[in-house]
Image (cartoon, helix red, strand yellow):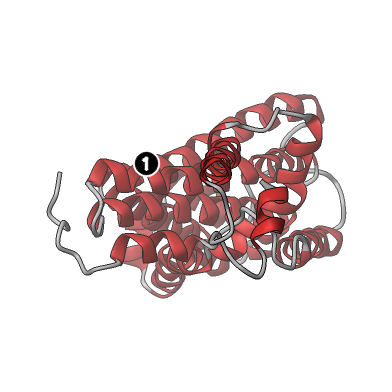
Amino acid sequence: MERLLALSQGNGLRGFEAEQIEALGRAYRQVLSVRLYRAPAPSWHRLGQFFWTDFARRFRAARGYLLVSALLLFGPALLAYLAALLDSTLRDAFVPAQLRNVMASGRSWTDIQPGLRPGMATLIFTNNIQVSFLAFSGGVLFGLGTVYVLVSNGLALGAVLGAAQFYGVAPLIWSFISPHGYLELTCIVIAGAAGLMLGDALLRPGLWLRREALARASRQAVELVVGAAPVLVVAGLIEGFVSPSELPVAAKLTFGPAAGAVLYALLFTLGRGPVAGVRRVETVWADRRVGGTRRAGSD
């Protein structure tokens, strides 16, 4: 194909024989078929490249969904924090009585015995996976499941922190949440963003059938969730071993922001520059919206 294209420079195809034109067509189809249908062989290098650079690109491309997901999580958290801090009725409604009694006595439920920490790390990791999975999979319910998971978890988090502030045990709670919280909450926001992608595809399929729009969005969403999995593992280990440890409160309060800063530095710097084959998430929605929404009601 390269040889034939070189021959066509200057005069185009006007000087070609019929056989050369046919050969060019065959070569074009062969090259296109290789590019479209021959999947690259899996390798550890490609897997490492995905987690090290490609995931960061997917993260930055999904910033609109990430912003909405963060607002759905932290907006209710702020409201619940103020409600539990300022109003006794709402505090009783949001925070279980057992937790209120513990905090009222000036204690925290976050102390974990060293011998129990490995098992607790596994339990915490499993719980984090469940929350993230629900936030992601809830997108197939036109995004309603994702919204519910984000809002409910935000309310629970904010209410506990507000009650802790009211009872004067906020430093104990913050020192437990800080080491792992920045990573864990980021993973939940990412899973929520992936779920919102699925919901958006179902609500606004554009010219695609809904199942086609969902299939196209699912790849982007799954890549986000899979890319965040190692971060979730690290957060679970930190929550099981570092958060309940005997480290000074100041050290724990510093550990969390430092871990978060490292994570976001990587997410916002790795994989900068144009890369072939990597498209912004927004182009998927642009493709669906070309020509209006004539099939927005398609099944």
The answer to which quarter of the image holds residue 45 is top right
Q: Quadrant of the C terminus?
A: top left
Horizontal side, residue 246 vs residue 18: left or right: right
Estimate the x, y position of residue 109 in percent, counting from the top left.
62, 44
Residue at horizontal 49 percent and vertical 57 percent from the top: 157
Residue at horizontal 49 percent and vertical 65 percent from the top: 70
Estimate the x, y position of residue 229 in percent, counting from the top left.
64, 40
Seen from the viewer's position, the closer of residues 16 and 144 is 16
Horizontal side, residue 196 vs residue 185: left or right: left
User: Badge 1 local density, few (<14 within 10 Å), some, or many (20+)?
Assistant: some
As displayed, is residue 270 above or below residue 224? below
Q: Amino acid at mark 1?
A: Ala
Residue at horizontal 58 percent and vertical 53 percent from the top: 16
Residue at horizontal 63 percent and vertical 46 percent from the top: 228
As displayed, is residue 147 above or below residue 80? above
Seen from the viewer's position, the closer of residues 52 and 196 is 52
As displayed, is residue 70 above or below residue 29? below
Seen from the viewer's position, the closer of residues 77 and 267 is 267
Horizontal side, residue 94 vs residue 31: left or right: left
Q: Which residue is mark 1?
A: 215
Seen from the viewer's position, the closer of residues 94 and 133 is 133
The answer to which quarter of the image holds residue 150 is bottom left
Q: Secondary structure at mark 1?
A: helix
Numbered marks: total: 1
Q: Is residue 161 visible?
A: yes
Estimate the x, y position of residue 1 in percent, counting from the top left.
66, 46
